Amino acid sequence: MYIRRFALIATLAIAVLLVTSVPALADPGGAQPVLPSVVPVCPGPAAAGTARCHSFVRTDKGGRPIKSTPSGYTPADLRAAYDITGDSTATVAIVDAFDDPNAEADLAVYRAEFKLPPCTTDNGCFKKVNQDGEPGPYPRPNNGWAQEISLDLDMVSAICPSCHILLVEASTNSFANLAKAVDTAAATPGVVAISNSYGGGEYSNEVNDQSHYNHPGIAITVSSGDGGYGVEFPAASQYVTAVGGTTLTKSGGTFSETAWSGAGSGCSAYIPKPSWQTDPDCPDNRTVADVSAVANPYTGVAVYDTYHTSGWLVFGGTSVSSPIIAAVYAVAGNISKTNYDGSYPYSHAGNLNDITSGSNGSCGGSYLCTAGTGYDGPTGLGTPKGTGGF
């Protein structure tokens, strides 16, 4: 009897741990749903020296991913929400860890569903390489990162249907391997933007390691994090566009946004303040974020993935917003040797949707965690309003 009672107590303890480990994220109406309603794709926190992907997958009341038919925002929704009317054939690179064996096949289903042009290896639109730039051997597969890869590929496709896509798979999720993958992407001819939907805790040597994200002539976007107020690397780098997150709500044909409670923001612990940032509460160090896009999984996006849970899924997290912004940079076609980091939006803020409400945590009421008129931490300068801000 005592053994049976002990087993019951242990089971209940594990159940409580699993439920409480899922962030309490607000739904579009502000109510807190019964958990689990979303689960992290790459559970964390990441170990020292490694990164975790910044995405959540939405589940039904039984904790199972929604997978029968497309649900969540479509390419048409996203382009309408951000007034994206142009296109491009430039190359957007995606850097992720581990391998997704089904990446190209899943991308084909997503694009066919939403009547986007095919993007395949055969027609030269899609290319997958390892961190050394070779078409194999690829890293070992990973369930969570495979879902992240599908999300990233689909979001670039949604915003820039004719863009070429380069997928660079790092051998592991260590910062060293991910940085190597970024360098490989940057060395590939035709790449104009690189999206990085991952991050981990800041560390003192990131001041030197950020050099891997410094590639003049290429816009490098990084998700700001999905744990709420606080800063992660490489979003803290002064050479990247740090991308925060919003709750995107559609009413009829009209979209509105507030700051998402999970978006990362704040003052970097180590990276000096770049000259193009002048906000007062981080006088000496880099402030995160610069811009933002949809990230709340309760107002999430449709994604197709078959490696782990087969079918249509709904995703959120700043892993959604980073590839969206990378694709906007590609459509804008404005990247140059002097306009490649996060500085350009600061001189073109009038071409962004200013997000003025919502919060991602407690910081004494400061703009670092609370959205308001002008710049704020969770949403930066705002979300795309066409491509003029990029």
Image (cartoon, grey):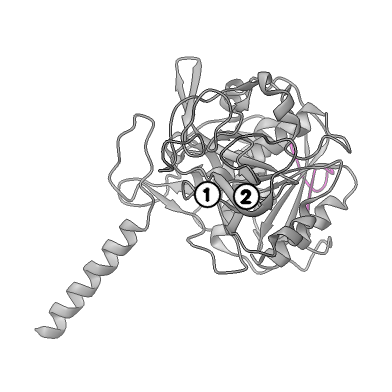
| Badge 2 density bin: few <14, some 14–19, many ≥20, Cα 10 Å | many
Residue receiving disc 1 = 55
Amino acid carrying mark 1 in the image: Ser
- Packing grade of label 1 (10 A; few <14, some 14-19, many >=20) is many
Classify residue 208 as left or right of residue 250. Answer: right
Is 216 within the magenta?
no
Quadrant of res 193: top right
- Residue range in magenta is 118-128
Q: CA distance from mark 2 to mark 1?
A: 8 Å
As for residue 122 lying within the magenta part, the answer is yes
Label 2: which residue? 197
Sequence-earlier tag: 2 or 1: 1
Name which residue lies at 82% across and 29% down. 333
Q: Is residue 109 visible?
A: no
Question: What residue type is disc 2 on?
Answer: Ser
Instruction: Indicate the quadrant containing the N terminus: top left, top right, bottom left or bottom right.
Output: bottom left
Q: Are marks 2 and 1 in contact (CB under 8 Å)?
A: yes
Horizontal side of residue 19 vs 363, given as left or right = left
Is residue 302 at least partly visible in the picture? yes
Residue 349 horizontal/vertical position (percent): 67, 23
